[in-house]
Amino acid sequence: MLSGVQVNVTVAQEPWIIIRARSRRQAMDWSLVLASQGIEPVIQHVPDEGGWGLRVNAGHHEAALAAIQQYRRENRGWRWRHRVASSEFTFHWGALVWGWGLILFHWWSAAWAGGLENAGAMNHRVAETGEWWRLFTATTLHADLGHLSSNVATGFVVLGLAMGRYGVGWALLAATFAGAFGNWLGLVMRQTPYIGLGASGVVMGALGLLTVYSFSLFRGVPGAKRQIIAGAAGGVILFALLGLSPNSDVLAHAGGFAGGVAFGLVFAWLPPAWLSSARANLLAGLSCGLGLAACWGLAMFR
């Protein structure tokens, strides 16, 4: 008898045996396990027992039980994964507003006499001039439509997921500061003159937030170590694919990603009610918008 698995043996005219499962989902999972071993099961409802089961040939009964038992043994530490699947890790369409904001700002910059790059782009002289606001204003500027479309397309997905996980305002504020940190890192590390602009640091900041979102599972979810490691590894791999192109600003990307990771670790230990609070998200979003407006005010009129 398979420990932990309810088995109901039915002998009919055909040599079939039904292995009972607790749910249709479990029966489907087990059917894939058996199919991988060359056993052809049939998922069927068991009305008398009010559940589901797998109908297998009697000659495959022992092999089927052994395969299911092995599957359960190997995945015993992953039972909590169903909880993750139903977590608040969702997509938020507020990222669409962010994307359109960048598009409209690029159009306004192009319409402005001479553009806004001279006033708001990042450069190597920021430390000398004290124009710290360029760390932030540079995240709203783009060199051309190709540069803009690339950041908007990637950022729409990544930032939308970060907003769904942390809240619209918190994610936007954290990703913006992460992008500014990426610009600061470029300022510190570069030894040659340069000009930097673009929202890619913000996008990498949002990716950093997502990379450590599973760290919150340390609280109240036993055996979460595997999922945390897998989530972090996946985020690092995505960063390598998206942020380490030789033709891109790697320092700004790395700084943005590191900043997002730092904010994400802080958020992981905050009470969930703080992140889900509509008032707190509104204040965070307004702080981000007003802060960027103030930075541009300094850039334009100082």
Image: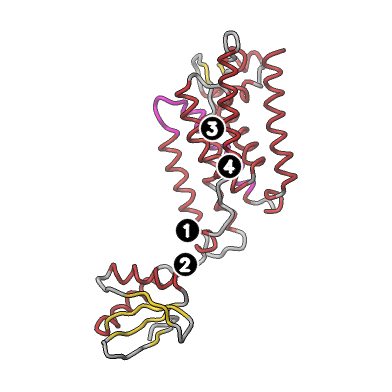
N-terminal of the two: label 3 or label 2?
Answer: 2
Question: Given the image, on which type of amino acid does mark 2 rest?
Answer: Gly
N-terminal of the two: label 4 or label 1?
Answer: 4
Within 10 Å of the Cα at label 1, are there few (<14), some (14-19), or many (20+) other Cα atoms? Answer: few
Residue 93 shown in magenta: no
Question: Given the image, on which type of amino acid does mark 3 rest?
Answer: Gly
Location of mark 2 (residue): 77
Location of the C terminus by quadrant is top right
- Residue 116 at what x, y percent from top left? 59, 14
Q: Which residues are magenta?
A: 243-267
User: Would you place residue 286 above or below residue 217 in this image?
Assistant: above
> Residue 97 versus residue 123: which sits nearer the camera?
97
Query: Mark 3 to mark 2: distance in Å?
Result: 35 Å
Location of mark 4 (residue): 93
- Kindly identify the residue that appears in the image at 42 percent across and 38 percent down: 240
Residue 254 shown in magenta: yes
Query: Mark 2 to mark 4: distance in Å?
Result: 34 Å
Q: Which mark is residue 255?
A: 3
Q: Which mark is residue 226?
A: 1
N-terminal of the two: label 1 or label 2?
Answer: 2
Contact flag, marks 1 and 2 (Cβ < 8 Å): yes
Q: Nearer the viewer, mark 2 or mark 4?
A: 4
Q: Nearer the viewer, mark 4 or mark 1?
A: 4
N-terminal of the two: label 2 or label 4?
Answer: 2
Location of the N terminus by quadrant is bottom left
